[in-house]
Image (tube, grey):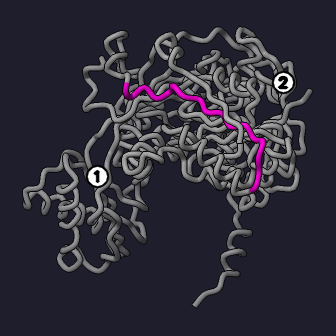
């Protein structure tokens, strides 16, 4: 049996329109990945305002498109759109189904990834160390606003085994959303490391939606067909773990050896040891064969036993930021921009405002490339000075921005064309503090709830 | 030995995890892969990024896709939601890496990056209503 799974969403804010193409092409599972590293922090702010929030708010739009297909028994949905409130997301899913006049749909929620309330307890039971620096938990710069563990595929498989048509989770490893239907349908064992690794690799290739189908391509990116109609990817996965990565037939975009390998290493560290909650996958063991016609065959993936820890992401307050941008024209565009940034920072110092960190960039010169730009001393026709700053509190960050305003009449000549955001509205900065936590401390608290609408 | 920018030989994609960025360097073919494996060391990449990166650089190999993967620590001004940088997610670091010049054997000296051709985009934009 060939199972068709699709990546219908790559982040919170992605377009729900691509889902229509996937459903029209026919997929057994539609997986919607909504949670980037910082998305939960955004959702946390949402929930502080309203207890019924805390999930990705575009979920109903996705469901409105997909639930009729679910009710007809043609597809199922697995999503982490539950964010920090999967229960509320499930309520919205039920409401969406009722609004569409649909019934007989089983909605499951997976709980237990949110460890915020248990964090101090956990820190007493185990040594939580920063994953990258090894710093101890006591070094966390300010109290954790959020602590969420990246769960694996098991609770999702439990939900599917209980007949769920829609599974809504909070934080889980992105690839687990895709691995779970494969384990469930193909009956893979939890120690069948090669197949689990194949499933994780497939999930990794689908989880960033358009990025496998011609989005963010380097090299000959301009040759991608109809990039405004970029499709999202589909994997046709066999019981033995081999797969074909492809896309809906009628769409634009491209799936090739090159588009697939671009995604293979995206946000990966050691590709021979890709640490997923359910398996350690060796991405370097896979063979990719371009079959033409937007089809790439993936075979030979090897896996090794999973570790006994989950990744746990803590998030903490890290100050307030503001930002201003000013554009300058030739002549001396670069020099005017440089001088204005310096005048601004001096004015701020003169005003007695405490700034903990500055970031001065010259757009059009080296704002992105920094020291890798070899010819930054040329004479560009236009330059934008972008200055960003960090302060301890929101009030100060806002007052700093206002010091840019008088420069309209009191700065280097002829070119003050506009203020950026920041001259008034500071934004909160959040620090990310990744660590590991023993599965045995998390799993007893993971639960699955299934409800029929 | 002739020198070429990596841009003439490789594709790239970069992304973030906390304050760590990774850059995949994707060789055009096996011949190029052998050369970048020899030339583009972690130390060389570390030196190339200079003050843009505060930590160490590690290199991994993925010969099955003719790629090297560089992991750059302290590369994002503190990490996505904490960083003041325009490119807080490291999306452009791949482009910055392929500015690096390396020595190549004579057989590769004539390699050039394909030239972007967006005539289709110009046509679309010229068709827009204007004042």
Near mark 1 (Cα within 10 A), the count class, few <14, some 14-19 or many ≥20, is many
Q: Residue at x 31, y 20 (%)?
A: A120
Q: Is residue A365 above or below residue A33?
A: below
Numbered range of the magenta stretch: A101-117
- In three-dimensional space, the C-alpha distance between marks 2 and 1, rounded to whole angstroms, equals 48 Å
Q: Residue at x 71, y 19 (%)?
A: A197
Classify residue A178 by image quadrant: top right
Image quadrant holding the N terminus of chain A, namely top right
Image quadrant holding the C terminus of chain A, namely top right
Question: Is residue B66 rendered to the left or right of residue A416?
Answer: right
Q: Position of residue A132 (x, y in %)?
A: 40, 22
Q: Is residue B109 visible?
A: yes
Q: Is residue A301 magenta?
A: no
Question: Is residue A309 rendered to the left or right of residue A219?
Answer: left
Sooner in the amino-acid sequence: mark 2 or mark 1? 2
- Is residue A92 or residue A65 the one in the foreground? A92
Furthest residue in direction right, as rendered? A1
Secondary structure of residue under mark 1: strand
Near mark 2 (Cα within 10 A), the count class, few <14, some 14-19 or many ≥20, is many
Q: To which residue does mark 1 refer?
A: A321
- Is residue A16 or residue A121 the one in the foreground? A121
Q: Position of residue A338 (x, y in %)?
A: 27, 62
User: Do the residues at pointers 2 and 1 share their chain?
Assistant: yes
Q: Position of residue A210 (x, y in %)?
A: 69, 48
Question: Is residue A408 rendered to the left or right of residue B23?
Answer: left
Number of labels in the image equals 2
Q: To which residue does mark 2 refer?
A: A242
Q: Is residue A109 magenta?
A: yes
Q: Which mark is residue B115?
A: none
Q: Is residue A376 above or below residue A300?
A: below
């Amino acid at each position: 049996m060939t199972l068709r799974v699709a990546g219908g969403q790559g982040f919170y804010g992605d377009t729900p329109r691509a889902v229509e193409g996937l459903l029209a092409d026919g997929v057994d599972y539609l997986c919607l990945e909504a949670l980037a590293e910082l998305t939960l922090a955004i959702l946390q702010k949402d929930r502080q305002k309203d207890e019924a929030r805390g999930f990705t708010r575009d979920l109903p739009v996705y469901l409105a498109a997909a639930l009729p297909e679910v009710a007809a028994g043609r597809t199922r949905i697995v999503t982490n759109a539950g964010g920090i409130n999967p229960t509320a997301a499930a309520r919205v899913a039920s409401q969406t189904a009722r609004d569409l006049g649909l019934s007989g749909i089983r909605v499951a929620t997976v709980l237990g990834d949110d460890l915020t309330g248990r964090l101090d307890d956990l820190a007493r039971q185990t040594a939580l160390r920063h994953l990258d620096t090894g710093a101890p938990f006591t070094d966390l710069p300010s109290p954790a606003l959020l602590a969420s563990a990246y769960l694996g595929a098991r609770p999702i498989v439990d939900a599917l085994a209980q007949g769920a048509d829609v599974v809504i989770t909070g934080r889980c490893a992105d690839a687990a959303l895709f691995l779970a239907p494969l384990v469930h349908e193909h009956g893979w064992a939890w120690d069948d490391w090669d197949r689990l690794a194949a499933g994780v690799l497939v999930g990794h290739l689908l989880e960033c939606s358009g990025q496998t189908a011609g989005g963010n391509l380097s090299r000959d990116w301009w040759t991608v067909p109809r990039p405004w109609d970029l499709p999202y990817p589909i994997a046709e996965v066999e019981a033995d773990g081999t797969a074909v990565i492809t896309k809906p037939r009628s769409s634009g975009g491209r799936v090739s050896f090159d588009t697939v390998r671009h995604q293979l290493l995206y946000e990966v560290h050691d590709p021979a040891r890709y640490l997923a909650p359910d398996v350690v996958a060796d991405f370097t063991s896979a063979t990719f064969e371009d079959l033409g016609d937007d089809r790439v065959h993936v075979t030979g993936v090897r896996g090794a036993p999973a570790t006994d820890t989950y990744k746990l992401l803590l998030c903490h307050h890290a100050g307030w930021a503001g930002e201003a941008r000013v554009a300058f024209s030739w002549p001396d565009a670069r020099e005017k921009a440089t001088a204005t940034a310096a005048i601004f920072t001096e004015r701020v110092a003169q005003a007695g405002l405490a700034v903990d960190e500055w970031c001065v960039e010259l757009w059009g010169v080296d704002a992105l490339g920094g020291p890798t730009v070899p010819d930054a001393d040329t004479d560009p026709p236009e330059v934008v000075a972008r200055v960003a700053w960090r302060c301890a509190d929101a009030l100060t960050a806002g007052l700093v921005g206002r010091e840019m305003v008088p420069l309209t009449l009191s700065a280097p000549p002829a070119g003050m064309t506009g203020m950026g955001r920041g001259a008034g509205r500071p934004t909160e900065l959040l620090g990310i503090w990744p660590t590991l936590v023993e599965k045995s401390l998390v799993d007893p608290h993971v639960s699955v709830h299934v409800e029929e609408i | 030995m002739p020198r070429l920018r990596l841009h003439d030989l490789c594709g790239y994609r970069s992304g973030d995890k906390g304050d760590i960025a990774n850059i995949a360097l994707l060789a055009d073919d096996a011949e190029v892969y052998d050369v970048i494996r020899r030339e583009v060391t972690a130390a060389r990449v570390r030196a190339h990024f200079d003050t843009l990166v505060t930590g160490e650089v590690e290199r991994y190999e993925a010969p099955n896709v003719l790629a090297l993967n560089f992991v750059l620590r302290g590369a994002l001004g503190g990490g996505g939601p904490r960083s003041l940088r325009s490119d807080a997610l490291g999306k452009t670091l791949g482009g910055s890496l392929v500015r690096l010049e390396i020595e190549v054997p004579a057989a590769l000296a004539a390699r050039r990056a394909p030239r972007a051709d967006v005539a289709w985009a110009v046509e679309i934009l010229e068709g827009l209503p204007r004042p």
